[in-house]
Amino acid sequence: MSDTLGDGKLELKQASKEVKESENVAEKYSAMTVNKNSEIVMGELSVSSAAFSAVPTHKPVKKQIQFVEDKQEFSRFPTKAGRRSLSRSISQSSTDSYSSAASYTDSSDDETSPRDKTQLNSKGTNDFCVKNIKQAEFGRREIEIAEQDMSALISLRKRAQGEKPLAGAKIVGCTHITAQTAVLIETLVALGAQCRWTACNIYSTQNEVAAALSEIGVAVFAWKGESEDDFWWCINKCINMEGWQPNMILDDGGDLTHWVYKKYPNGFKKIRGIVEESVTGVHRLYQLSKAGKLCVPAMNVNDSVTKQKFDNLYCCRESILDGLKRTTDVMFGGKQVVVCGYGEVGKGCTAALKAMGSIVYVTEIDPICSLQACMDGFRVVKLNEVIRQVDIIITCTGNKNVVTRDQLDRMKNGSIVCNMGHSNTEIDVASLRTPELTWERVCSQVDHVIWPDGKRVILLAEGRLLNLSCSTVPTFVLSITATTQALALIELYNAPEGRYKQDVYLLPKKMDEYVASLHLPTFDAHLTELSDEQAKYLGLNKNGPFKPNYYRY
């Protein structure tokens, strides 16, 4: 016994000595002014800019125009009881069935539809429909924070505020309602416009921001977690206001334009133009133009350089990771991912995933985009070739039925499916609403679809836009797009009669360059100025534009 105790004392002394030595080792190591080349007075921009070049005419399409929502019944709205049964009858994943669909400040009446509430703002008006008007103060703070990173739009607001280039404009908008969009809306109001607004996505509305806009008198009809019926009801309320006739449309996805076309075609007699910023919406405008049914000039903002190369590419490069992490906490290293589509959105998504160590495949229909993907180090495949082995599928095409039910049936357990395109038709979600499949809501915007054998596929935002539905996007990039939208509205509204025909137009290079120049001071970037000799040699104006319209950045 004594020998054992003695050995223990020796071991304690030795351990104590080692601790002191390690502590000694630890102590050793513990110790809007823009470059003058790009300045353009507001008058020249808003009224005197060079006429836009019309989009080249495409071959006529013989097929009758068909919109994604053509199957919807537009002629009638269900009663209150009907709305409740409609919104809950499809599956357990109905958008208004979960209190988690509410915004940051959930309250006890979250289950009550805003359509069934009576709310007044501080001015005593009720021309709005939002989740909770009492959230306005919180929303105001979010808008103020967004303004700090949208200096270019604020600069544009200050430069043009005295001229009021949108005085008399009655703008009806259908976009994502976020703090960044609110800065755009308030800029339009400061420039003289009256605005009524609704949401282009049933999940992306920030309730507190919608309340803040309603508080200052902007008629907003939107809340996070709308049902499909709510979505169309809000659009209709936005347009159908007695004594108020819109003369400009700002759309994101074409739903608002489609609704006016279907329900209020005579309204186009007073509308001066449409500004559209999404692939889906621009595609619809082209359909109308080809069929000779586009009643007013339309501005294709989506294909402007400042939208394509910044919002679509750089925004998605950052927000794809944010959206996936917030919803699933997935680790990207080693995961096999398929990105469907290698346009600017697809390029942004693949670059981010590759940088995180994912094995990335690309599907494409365009041989040029496919070659780009190959040169960037991605394997171009058909989805069916890898469907059984991939961990994540991300759609970025703007098309329909990119991922079908047959392909979803063959995905492995635990796979994630999501969409980064505007339209909610890329993943065939409707085919999953069948009796043999069980939907389990895990948290807001995250559903587990369970097959009879127990296999689970994780579906995000029910196939709608991932980044704005499940996370947020960088404010600075949205400043670029919002500035472009504001200038497009100013140009169309002030254009003399006859400058624009009933066609789809692209932004001129001069305006794209101006938007970019407004954002350079953020980086303390200094443009080089051409000498007279250099400008003459290149055949350019020293103040731009510096690239021809056919130049591809």
Image (tube, grey):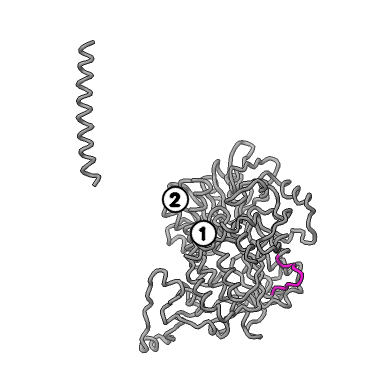
Q: Start and end of the magenta stretch?
A: 238-246
Quadrant of the image for the N terminus?
top left
Q: Nearer the viewer, residue 397 or 525?
A: 525
Q: Nearer the viewer, residue 432 or 212?
A: 212
Q: Amino acid at mark 2?
A: Ser
Give percent across and percent down for residue 490. Answer: 59, 78
Q: Going by the image, does 166 lie left or right of 41?
A: right
Indicate whether 389 appears above or below 144. above
Indicate whether 536 appears above or below 247. below
The structure residue drawn at horizontal position 63% and vertical position 62%, both measured from the top left corner, is 215
CA gap between label 2 and label 1 equals 22 Å
Q: Secondary structure at mark 2?
A: loop
* Residue that numbered label 1 is attached to: 473
Give percent across and percent down for residue 486. Answer: 57, 73
Give percent across and percent down for residue 49. Answer: 55, 84
Indicate whether 327 appears above or below 376. above
User: Mark 2 or mark 1: which comes first in sequence?
Assistant: 2
240 inside magenta stretch: yes
